[in-house]
């Protein structure tokens, strides 16, 4: 609309200026032509004469001026004013010589002279027309008519006013029409703009309102926008699908993943990485050193960005439980240009732990086997070298060989039990916990009677648990056996059960085997469930233990998805316990 209005204003201004000048020129030319005709007509009024009477000449000038309502001046051939309708006869001598007037000069050449200039005599702008009077005087006398331009200016002002009023009306009409046309043309453009903004908002599945325009160009633009929007929606759908897939893949990967941009700042991480490094704040936009707090990783990221080469190394994290990470950092390329790096953190702590456990296991098994095997070999050699002839010594050596063979048998049985626990599935069922506790107390009852140890079972007869009964019975046997072995004569061992939650029906129960034995030092409590770990190695072997009983208990409980725990006070007894799920009613 503003463009249209500005165009109209410029055109009207140009036309107005042109009309003003053209009108001025037209009026002056029209008046000049009128004066020329009137001058020619006035020249015929004056009768021919060879003599010039000043009074008669001035009278003629006054008569012409009065009848034509103009200023009439009669000028001799030498420029002297002979008569003037606006000047008295006696004052004619005071007038300037008119020989240098342009209109006079032209008239002397036989032409109709014309001039437009300011009159000092009358004090206003005047239009002069001069006509040569060949029949009067010396034949060079000139009749000059003059008209003030004040009337022309008034007329021109009136016409100009009319023109500007008409122009203003035309401008108003043009503004109204421009507004209507602009609204008519801009409405589909505004709708297209709204549709383009909806497209820019990139809402998948949203429908952009792009109207059909009234002109061919806008209609083609509308069709192009619709086509572009359809392609954009299709590509957005593909991008969204790929993004969801990528996020699902990243979140399902247990390895930590970190992607940085060209500037080394993080642009993407997955939950595994945040979990590995305990990152709680948003990670995007930070430098790796600000998130991982490891100079080696930060230096490797910078090196990969600079050298565009993949780097791998192992990383050990201290502070809290020691963790081991296998780190692979490689460049992200686009058209052979490195635009960032991707770092993958593999948590190999379990592998390192298994390696350490394997080494410890091999070392412990070797140690446990070496002692009885050495004893067996030594006594066997002694017997073969002649000790068989001494019946009393031979019988003693055979009993020692038998005890060491039993020790090897117990050790192998425990190892087989551990292997079976790690490979077999549970056979869960409803079991009465009191029956399992009583069955666990029976095998050690003879040893308990020998040491005068009282074994108590304090479990409600109606309490049922959802477990593998054979395994739980084996766990209880191991715990009760330890309680009896490490309790002095006259002591007490007790099997009890209590609800884990005080309020409402229990979902779990805590099964505890407590004794009044020698207890366990506090620094050993965290390791008693490890394989082959003994608090008192000499006494444990003397009691016939293999060092695997509590490890078997832990495996049984953890295979049920429950937890095992221990509480002890040196010299006052020990309590081993674990949780079990209560069977639903």
Image (tube, grey):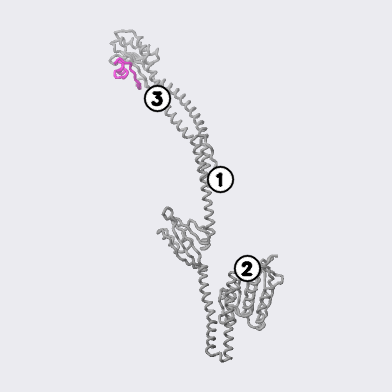
Q: Is residue 121 left or right of residue 6?
A: left
Residues in magenta, as a range: 93-119
Q: Secondary structure at mark 1?
A: loop
Badge 2 marks a residue whose secondary structure is loop
Which numbered marker is on residue 21? 3
Q: Residue at x 35, y 12 (%)?
A: 40
Mark 3: few/some/many CA within 10 Å (<14, 14-19, 20+): few
Compared with 258, 175 (above or below) is above
Q: Residue 359 vs residue 65: left or right? A: right
Q: Which residue is mark 1?
A: 206
- Where's residue 541, x and y in %? 57, 81
User: Residue 453: x percent and y percent?
Assistant: 66, 81
Is residue 72 shown to the viewer in this render?
yes
Q: In this image, 507 relative to 93: left or right? A: right
Please say whether residue 95 is one of the residues in the magenta stretch: yes
Residue ID for mark 2:
426
* Marks 3 and 1, the one that precedes in the sequence: 3
C-alpha distance separating marks 3 and 1: 63 Å
Q: Earlier in the sequence, mark 3 or mark 2?
A: 3
């Amino acid at each position: 609309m503003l463009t249209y209005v500005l165009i109209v204003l410029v055109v009207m201004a140009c036309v107005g200026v042109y009309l003003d000048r053209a009108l001025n020129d037209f009026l002056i030319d029209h008046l000049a032509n009128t004066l020329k005709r009137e001058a020619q007509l006035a020249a015929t009024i004056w009768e021919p004469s060879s003599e010039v009477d000043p009074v008669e000449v001035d009278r003629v000038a006054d008569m012409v001026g009065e009848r034509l309502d103009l200023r009439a001046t009669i000028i001799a051939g030498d420029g002297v004013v002979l008569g003037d309708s606006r000047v008295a006869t006696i004052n004619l001598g005071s007038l300037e010589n008119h020989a240098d007037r342009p209109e006079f000069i032209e008239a002397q050449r036989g032409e109709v002279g014309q001039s437009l200039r300011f009159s000092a005599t009358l004090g206003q702008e005047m239009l002069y027309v001069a006509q040569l009077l060949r029949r009067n005087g010396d034949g060079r006398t000139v009749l000059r008519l003059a008209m003030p331009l004040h009337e022309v200016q008034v007329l021109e002002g009136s016409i100009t006013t009319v023109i500007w009023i008409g122009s203003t009306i035309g401008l108003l009409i043009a503004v109204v029409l421009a507004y209507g046309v602009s609204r008519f043309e801009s409405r589909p453009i505004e709708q297209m703009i709204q549709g383009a903004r909806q497209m820019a908002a990139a809402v998948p599945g949203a429908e952009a309102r792009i109207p059909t325009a009234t002109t061919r160009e806008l209609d083609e633009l509308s069709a192009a926008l619709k086509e572009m929007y359809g392609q954009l929606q299709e590509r957005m759908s593909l991008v969204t699908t790929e993004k969801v897939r990528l996020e699902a893949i990243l979140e399902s990967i247990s390895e930590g993943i970190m992607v940085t941009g060209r500037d080394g700042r993080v642009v993407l991480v997955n939950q595994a990485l945040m979990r590995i490094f305990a990152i709680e704040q948003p990670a995007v936009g930070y430098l790796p050193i600000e998130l991982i707090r490891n100079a080696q990783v930060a230096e490797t990221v910078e090196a990969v960005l600079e050298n565009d080469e993949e780097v791998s190394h192992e990383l050990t994290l201290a502070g809290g439980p020691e963790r081991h990470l296998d780190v692979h950092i490689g460049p992200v390329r686009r058209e052979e240009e490195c635009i960032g790096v991707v770092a993958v953190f593999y948590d190999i702590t379990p592998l390192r732990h298994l390696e350490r456990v394997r080494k410890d296991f091999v070392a412990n098994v070797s140690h446990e086997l070496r002692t009885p095997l050495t004893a067996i070999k030594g006594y066997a050699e002694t017997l073969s070298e002649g000790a068989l002839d001494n019946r009393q010594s031979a019988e003693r050596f055979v009993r020692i060989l038998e005890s060491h063979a039993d020790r090897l048998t117990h050790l192998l049985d425990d190892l087989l039990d551990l292997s079976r626990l790690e490979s077999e599935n549970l056979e869960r069922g409803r079991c009465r916990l009191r029956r399992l506790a009583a069955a666990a107390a029976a095998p050690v009852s003879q040893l308990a009677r020998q040491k005068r140890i009282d074994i108590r079972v304090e479990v409600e007869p109606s309490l049922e648990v959802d477990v593998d009964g054979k395994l739980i019975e084996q766990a209880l046997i191991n715990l009760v056996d330890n309680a009896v072995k490490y309790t002095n004569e006259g002591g007490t061992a007790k099997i009890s059960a209590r609800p884990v939650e005080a309020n409402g029906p229990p979902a779990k129960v805590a099964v505890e085997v407590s004794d009044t034995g020698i207890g366990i030092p506090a620094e050993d409590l965290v390791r008693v469930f490890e394989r082959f770990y003994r608090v008192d190695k000499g006494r444990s072997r003397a009691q016939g233990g293999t060092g695997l009983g509590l490890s078997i208990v832990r495996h049984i409980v953890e295979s049920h998805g429950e937890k095992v725990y221990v509480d002890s006070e040196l010299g006052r007894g020990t309590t081993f316990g674990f949780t079990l799920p209560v069977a639903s009613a």
